[in-house]
Image (cartoon, rainbow, N blue to C red):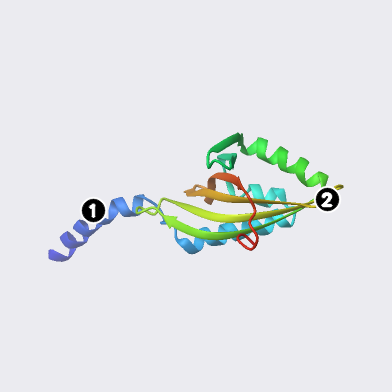
Amino acid sequence: MRGPLTLAFLALLAGPALAAGPRLTEPQVRALAARQSHAWNAGDLAAYFATFAPAARFTDQALGNDNRIAPYGVSTLAQARAQSRKTLARGKVRETATLTAVSVSPDGASAQAAADVVTEIASEGAPRRVCARRAETFAMTPAGLRATGQTDTIVRCRAGAMG
């Protein structure tokens, strides 16, 4: 009778782990970030925004010369999509994001990623270059791995520092 009791005991121990769902991994987060970058640079907003959870929030802010954060605003998924359509309609936008760190929570339920981002904007006027530090959060949802939030902090572009 040891066999069935042992199996029952192991099932009880494994129950919470199995109920918690799949654990996120760093390669999964990196792959999703790469899909986001590819979709954005292809101008495929449907594919880009499909990588975000419906309740995702987008925060834009700037780092001042005094190292204080100046908030620009927070957008919902729908607001970010509408603003992105306007931006892409005005000109060509190319973004290079270099992941600098990925951290998966100890329980594997969520993750954070940090990236240096350089955005090249070509429109009617002179081309512009915008540099930012990006912090993005991820979680497993019923639809799979999705980004749940993104904060871009605009920083001064430094020669050779960010691409």
Percent x, y of residue 2: 13, 64
Relative to 82, does residue 124 appear above or below in the rendering? below
Q: Dot 2, crowdedness within 10 Å: few (<14), some or many (≥20)?
A: few
Q: Which mark is residue 12?
A: 1
What kind of element bears circle 2? Answer: loop
Would residue 20 be found to the left or right of residue 112 on screen? left
Would residue 31 be found to the left or right of residue 92 on screen? left
Name the residue rendered at 70%, 48% in the picture. 46
Disc on the earlier residue, 1 or 2: 1
Name the residue rendered at 39%, 52% in the picture. 105
Relative to 123, does residue 1 appear above or below in the rendering? below
What kind of element bears circle 1? Answer: helix
Percent x, y of residue 94: 73, 56
Amino acid marked by disc 1: Leu
Percent x, y of residue 151: 56, 44
Name the residue rendered at 58%, 45% in the picture. 153
Q: Which residue is mark 2?
A: 126
In front of the other: 53 or 111 = 111
Distance between the Cα atoms at labels 1 and 2?
Answer: 64 Å
Quadrant in the picture for the C terminus: bottom right
Quadrant in the picture for the N terminus: bottom left
The mark total stands at 2
